[in-house]
Image (spheres, rainbow, N blue to C red):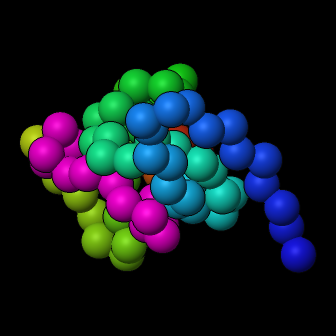
Amino acid sequence: MNFVQVEFVIGMVMVQIKVNGEFEIIENNITIAELLSYRKLPSVFVVELNKNIIKKDDYNKTFLKDGDIVEIATFCAGG
Protein backbone atom coordinates (compact mmCIF):
# COMPACT_ATOMS: atom_id res chain seq x y z
CA MET A 1 0.00 0.00 0.00
CA ASN A 2 1.37 3.43 -0.95
CA PHE A 3 0.91 6.39 1.33
CA VAL A 4 1.06 9.96 0.07
CA GLN A 5 1.85 12.81 2.44
CA VAL A 6 -0.51 15.69 1.76
CA GLU A 7 -0.13 19.18 3.10
CA PHE A 8 -3.47 20.96 3.29
CA VAL A 9 -3.73 24.69 2.89
CA ILE A 10 -6.82 26.35 4.35
CA GLY A 11 -9.41 26.85 1.64
CA MET A 12 -7.49 24.82 -0.95
CA VAL A 13 -8.88 21.53 -2.25
CA MET A 14 -6.35 19.00 -3.46
CA VAL A 15 -6.90 16.05 -5.81
CA GLN A 16 -4.84 13.05 -6.85
CA ILE A 17 -3.93 12.44 -10.47
CA LYS A 18 -1.47 10.11 -12.15
CA VAL A 19 1.20 11.64 -14.42
CA ASN A 20 3.36 9.30 -16.48
CA GLY A 21 2.67 6.46 -14.06
CA GLU A 22 3.35 8.42 -10.85
CA PHE A 23 0.69 9.67 -8.45
CA GLU A 24 0.71 13.41 -7.76
CA ILE A 25 -1.34 15.62 -5.50
CA ILE A 26 -2.33 18.87 -7.19
CA GLU A 27 -4.63 21.78 -6.51
CA ASN A 28 -8.18 21.16 -7.72
CA ASN A 29 -9.28 22.89 -10.93
CA ILE A 30 -5.94 23.52 -12.59
CA THR A 31 -5.64 23.25 -16.34
CA ILE A 32 -3.32 21.11 -18.38
CA ALA A 33 -1.46 24.31 -19.30
CA GLU A 34 -0.90 25.06 -15.61
CA LEU A 35 0.32 21.51 -14.96
CA LEU A 36 2.76 21.78 -17.88
CA SER A 37 4.06 25.16 -16.72
CA TYR A 38 5.62 23.47 -13.67
CA ARG A 39 7.66 21.10 -15.83
CA LYS A 40 10.69 21.50 -18.06
CA LEU A 41 9.60 19.96 -21.35
CA PRO A 42 11.24 19.76 -24.76
CA SER A 43 9.71 21.74 -27.60
CA VAL A 44 7.86 18.74 -29.06
CA PHE A 45 5.51 16.71 -26.87
CA VAL A 46 1.94 15.44 -26.75
CA VAL A 47 -0.48 15.25 -23.83
CA GLU A 48 -2.92 12.40 -23.35
CA LEU A 49 -5.70 12.71 -20.75
CA ASN A 50 -7.56 9.53 -19.85
CA LYS A 51 -6.42 7.90 -23.13
CA ASN A 52 -7.49 10.88 -25.28
CA ILE A 53 -4.96 13.15 -26.98
CA ILE A 54 -5.58 16.78 -26.07
CA LYS A 55 -5.08 19.47 -28.71
CA LYS A 56 -2.59 22.17 -27.78
CA ASP A 57 -5.34 24.80 -28.25
CA ASP A 58 -7.34 23.08 -25.48
CA TYR A 59 -4.60 23.01 -22.79
CA ASN A 60 -5.96 26.23 -21.22
CA LYS A 61 -9.56 24.99 -21.35
CA THR A 62 -9.09 21.45 -20.04
CA PHE A 63 -9.30 21.20 -16.25
CA LEU A 64 -7.87 18.25 -14.32
CA LYS A 65 -9.98 16.41 -11.77
CA ASP A 66 -9.46 13.72 -9.16
CA GLY A 67 -8.47 10.38 -10.67
CA ASP A 68 -7.36 11.72 -14.05
CA ILE A 69 -4.53 9.92 -15.82
CA VAL A 70 -2.13 12.17 -17.74
CA GLU A 71 0.59 10.95 -20.07
CA ILE A 72 3.13 13.43 -21.42
CA ALA A 73 5.05 11.91 -24.33
CA THR A 74 8.13 13.47 -25.88
CA PHE A 75 9.64 12.66 -29.23
CA CYS A 76 13.23 12.00 -30.15
CA ALA A 77 14.94 11.33 -33.44
CA GLY A 78 16.96 8.23 -34.00
CA GLY A 79 17.70 5.58 -36.45
Query: Is 37 one of the magenta-colored residues?
Result: no
Magenta stretch?
58-71
- Frontmost residue, 22 versus 75: 22
Task: Assign the N terminus to one quadrant of the image.
Answer: bottom right
Residue 34: % across, % down: 34, 32
Residue 68: % across, % down: 43, 66
Residue drawn at x 36%, y 60% as measured from the top left: 65
Quarter of the figure with residue 19 = bottom right
Judged left or right of residue 70, residue 25 is right
Judged left or right of residue 36, residue 5 is right
- Frontmost residue, 75 versus 18: 18
Residue drawn at x 28%, y 64% as measured from the top left: 53
Query: Is 62 one of the magenta-colored residues?
Result: yes
- Frontmost residue, 42 versus 47: 47
Q: How many marks?
A: 0
Q: Is residue 66 visible?
A: yes
Quarter of the figure with residue 20 = bottom right
Dominant SS in magenta: loop
Residue 57: % across, % down: 11, 42
Extreme residue in the front direction: 10
Residue drawn at x 48%, y 70% as measured from the top left: 67
Q: Is residue 56 above or below residue 50?
A: above
Extreme residue in the right direction: 1
Residue 15: % across, % down: 50, 55
Q: Is residue 32 above or below residue 51?
A: above
Judged left or right of residue 48, residue 23 is right
Q: Is residue 75 visible?
A: no
